[in-house]
Image: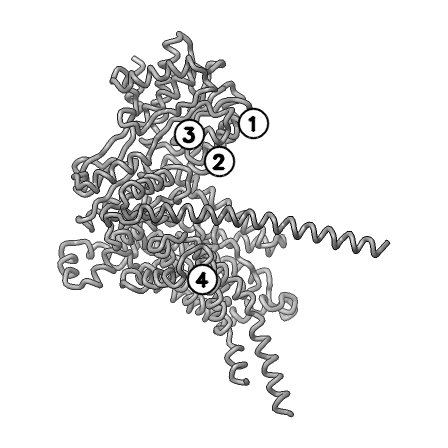
Amino acid sequence: MEKTAKILKKPITSTIIAIVCGFAVAAIVLAAAGYNPSAAFGALFSGIFSKPKYISNVIIKATPITLTALSVAFAYKVGLFNIGAEGQYIIGAVAANLVGYLCNFPPIIQIPLVVLSGVAAGALWGGIIGFLKAKFGIHEVLTSIMFNWIAFYISNWVVSSARFHEPNSTAAYPVNPSSYTMLLPNWKTSDAGLAVLKGHKALREVLLKTDVNFGFVIAIAAAVFVWMLLYRSTKGYELRAVGLNRDAAEFAGISVNKNIIITMLIAGALSGLAASMVITGTDPHRISTLSAFENNGFNGLSVAFIAGSSPIGCIFAGLLFGGLLYGGQSIQANIGAPSEIINIMIGTIVFFVALTAVIPKLAVRLEKRGMHNAAK
Amino acid sequence: MKKMKKLLAVVLAGTMAVSMGACGSTGSASSAAGGSASSGAAGASAGGKGYKVRMVTDTGGVNDQSFNQSSWEGLKNLKKDTGADVNYVESKQESDYATNLDKAADENANLIWGIGFAMAKSIGSAAKENPDINYAIVDNSYDKATMPSNVTGVMFRAQEPSFIVGYIAGKTTKTGKVGFVGGIRSNIIDQFEYGYKAGVAYAAKEMNKKITVDAQYAESFSDSSKGKAIANSMFSSGCDIVFHAAGGVGVGVIAAAKDAGKYAIGVDRDQAYLAPKNVLTSALKLVYSAVEDVSKKAMKGEKIGGKTFTYGLKENAVGIPTEHKLMGDATYQAAMKVENDIKSGKIVPPATKAEFDKFGK
């Protein structure tokens, strides 16, 4: 009994239970729609794991949502709900695309320049929200929703402007190849590269058929950075104090307003970094006309939630989410079930994560009952 | 009294439950019937030849009321006729094109369709990687010199139906002013704009009248509220007919015509169902018939790679609907005469600005 209680108390247990429940609900929905659930899940898993290049694609898909999840999780630890990750991502993508297109330096200057311009634009976008909250007390949820739309229309305006619109397309001009952050972008398609890769089938598939890039390494580094900042620095202590109890923090002499602005700057920078890595790391290396949000930021919300706002947890939740998004298309392709099934599954998992907050409480009950029995 | 109220409540609840149950049961009965009918159809088409056709949508998705949907209809027809194995993969973002095309190739497809010119680059590189697979793309033609030998382009002479609807608009307008709403400017949308303008000019010349065309772009293929705003301003500035070539934006254009009691002209499919009293006619561009046709050619083993097929009136892949109660018989017959003139080559509708400038002279 005590052992079960101990296991149930761990946050990871509730998350796993939530994921199992998500799969169960998806199975019921699939069966009700007349599809074989085991065939569907078989397609899902073979769509993720059956080839090295699929795994590579999952990691590529996971990169931006891991970073936006970090953005959301970090702000959440300071008591702020950053629903504006979507807009910060979009504005970061616009900035990275424009700088990458207009400038053409050698990679050693160009890559940091392009990446940092996306980061700066995202930070600015988040910082404004933080400033409005700190200075005028405007709730960050309201402003960030509005700023999402402002970013959305700025992006569409840039794409359709005569200066940046590529004729006969629905997109802007892509960034210059010197901004690419893929692994060996030039070598792999050169004659020498092709000759070497000829002998290595798996390597060739991964390198040539997917845009393997440094994005996920950056995402892991960012997760470690956020964790260190929050839990291993004085600043982090301040930030968390603001998150736990604003009034108490103020009373203890911590400047709440300053910390709110700093938090939103960093959160915005993380979302902007997500966009920079996508623009520099994956085809088509450009922004295109948006007809709806692409959900890079909103998916980050779900990922952060699944991860329980733990920075390191975001890495794994991001991979899970990336796997579901990418593998989910195989369900559609192989057995014909609509890919919306995956959305139902993701929604259910998030829902159960929220619900399973009761599990640790249940564990305490179990423990108490155990003690009670022991006393008898 | 209190007891009465309680009783009443119970009775009411009872009737509600019964009536709800009744609704539920009829609903389930009809859906069951639908289910069996569709499974029957699937059974009939089984036993195909194992020819695999895959289609990758652009970011519009498979239910876009436009060319993705139409292409998928074409593939479903193909399955019905020949028993080919067809399926689609939806792209959510532009970065999905390459990975989705790769996935379709992994399924050992014989023919892979990409829908829309936005996919041109991705199709080109996928074709180079998989020289054994046939690729086809809707609304794009490659440069002859750089075109991979296993890619087929499918184009439409959209200027032909646009010319006819322009002619009809010119014949029908009372104010001498008509409008055009485009999506995002490109060679494809130019076909609609200049075909339409030439049709209007042709009608004006015939009737010896002056008719002006107000052309505007929405910079979007999905923002229907923008379509509505543009069409509203056109109607209030004196236009009485507006033609759109703007995908989802056009839904707003047609809604504006309905509100103003004026006419709109639909595009791609017969859009009269959106506003039966206000959609004068539609410039049909039957993507499905071309998709079906090219797929069949490929199935028969015909060499289709490296070529661009262009579909127009002659191939019955464009035109206008036969329903014509809003324009009247005389106009319709005149339009049919124009159609025949285009078919016979007597009229060559312009597809670009340069051709249009020459057309007037």
Name the residue at the right extreme: B1
Q: CA distance from mark 1 to mark 4?
A: 46 Å
Give the class, few, some or many, for how many residues have Cα within 10 Å of label 2's Cα (few <14, many ≥20).
many
Q: Residue at x 63, y 71 (%)?
A: A252
- Disc 2 marks a residue whose amino acid type is Ser
Q: Secondary structure at mark 1?
A: helix
Q: Earlier in the sequence, mark 2 or mark 1?
A: 2
From the viewer's side, name the closer residue of A181 and A23.
A23
Marks 1,4: beta carbons within 8 A: no
Residue B216 in the figure: left or right of residue A355: left
Residue A309 in the figure: left or right of residue B113: right
Give the class, few, some or many, for how many residues have Cα within 10 Å of label 1's Cα (few <14, many ≥20).
few
Q: Is residue A192 above or below residue A172?
A: below
Q: Is residue B206 above or below residue A197?
A: above
From the viewer's side, name the closer residue of B276 and A169.
B276
Marks 3,2: beta carbons within 8 A: no
Q: CA distance from mark 3 to mark 2?
A: 18 Å
Chain bearing mark 1: B
Q: Which residue matches tag 1?
A: B259
Q: Which residue matches tag 2?
A: B224
Q: CA distance from mark 3 to mark 4?
A: 39 Å
Q: Which residue matches tag 3?
A: B270
Q: Which residue matches tag 4?
A: A27
From the viewer's side, name the closer residue of B87 and B358.
B87
Q: Is residue A297 above or below residue B281?
A: below
- Disc 4 marks a residue whose amino acid type is Ala
